[in-house]
Amino acid sequence: MEFFLDTANLDQIKEVRELGLLDGVTTNPTLMSREGGDWREQAALICEAVDGPVSLEVIGTSAGEMIKEAKDLVSFGPNVVVKIPMIPEGLKALKELTERGIKTNVTLVFSPNQALLAAKLGATYVSPFVGRLDALGQSGMEGVNQMRTIFDNYGFATKILVASVRHPMHVLDSGLIGADVVTLPYSTILQLMHHPLTDKGLAAFLADWEAFQKGN
Ligand code: E4P
């Protein structure tokens, strides 16, 4: 399973890269706006810092606008994946971008049928937003499970990129289901690493060793 970082923050990207856990990055207009400054400069720096796919999202809502933006976004680097919203105009744009060989990530996916449409049109990734569904009392991960079954039934190459991750259970369930990628907030990566029994166990080992050394 690949780990993408769901951020536009360069410090977070560098930290996770140093851990050796960075397979790619996903951004969206909200994440980019949080960083402030010139978004073009930020996008270029992110593409340069990441040795893997970087999703940059279009803002337009017509197929024509999305295709035009996509052509601009891919100029930021060979690793750019164009993020397209799951709306009818987005699907039109997706078809065209697939034909042009541009990598795509269909975002704001909330149902297995939406994912099926994106896969039929050759999306590179589909991004089911599990946390936002859970917040409405619907199971985000159940939808991902159904997507996995549908994609496997028909041999779709589209990768399932679990997004809107809120906690480590989403990561565990993604692994059990066989999702291809999870995109994680920085805070969730930290949560995955830590366990109180690890800290307690290490403290005890070090204390015992120190006592042993003093006794010699
Ligand atoms: C990823 O591609 C999405 O933009 C992101 O995971 C959305 O997550 P949110 O629900 O925390 O905004």
Image (spheres, rainbow, N blue to C red):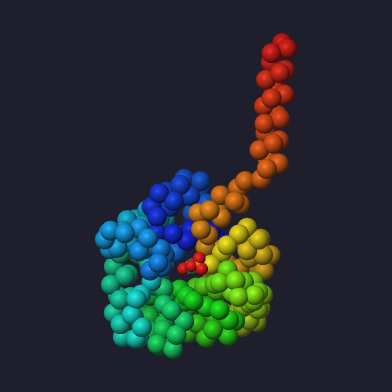
Residue that protrudes farthest toward the front in the picture: 136
Q: Position of residue 81 (x, y in %)?
A: 40, 69
Which quarter of the figure is the N terminus placed in? bottom right
Residue found at x 60% / y 75%? 136
Residue that protrudes farthest toward the top in the picture: 216
**Quadrant of residue 71 within the rendered picture:** bottom left
Residue found at x 39% / y 59%? 8
Q: Position of residue 150 (x, y in %)?
A: 63, 81
Is 199 left or right of 36, judged from the image as shown?
Answer: right
Residue 140 at least partly seen: no
Decide which of 199, 157 is in the foreground and name it.
199
Up the image or down, 4 lies above or below 93; here it is above
Residue found at x 58% / y 81%? 111
Is 207 left or right of 68, judged from the image as shown?
Answer: right
Which quarter of the figure is the C terminus placed in? top right
What is the total number of numbered labels drawn onto the structure image? 0
Q: Position of residue 83 (x, y in %)?
A: 41, 73
Decide which of 87, 21 is in the foreground and name it.
87
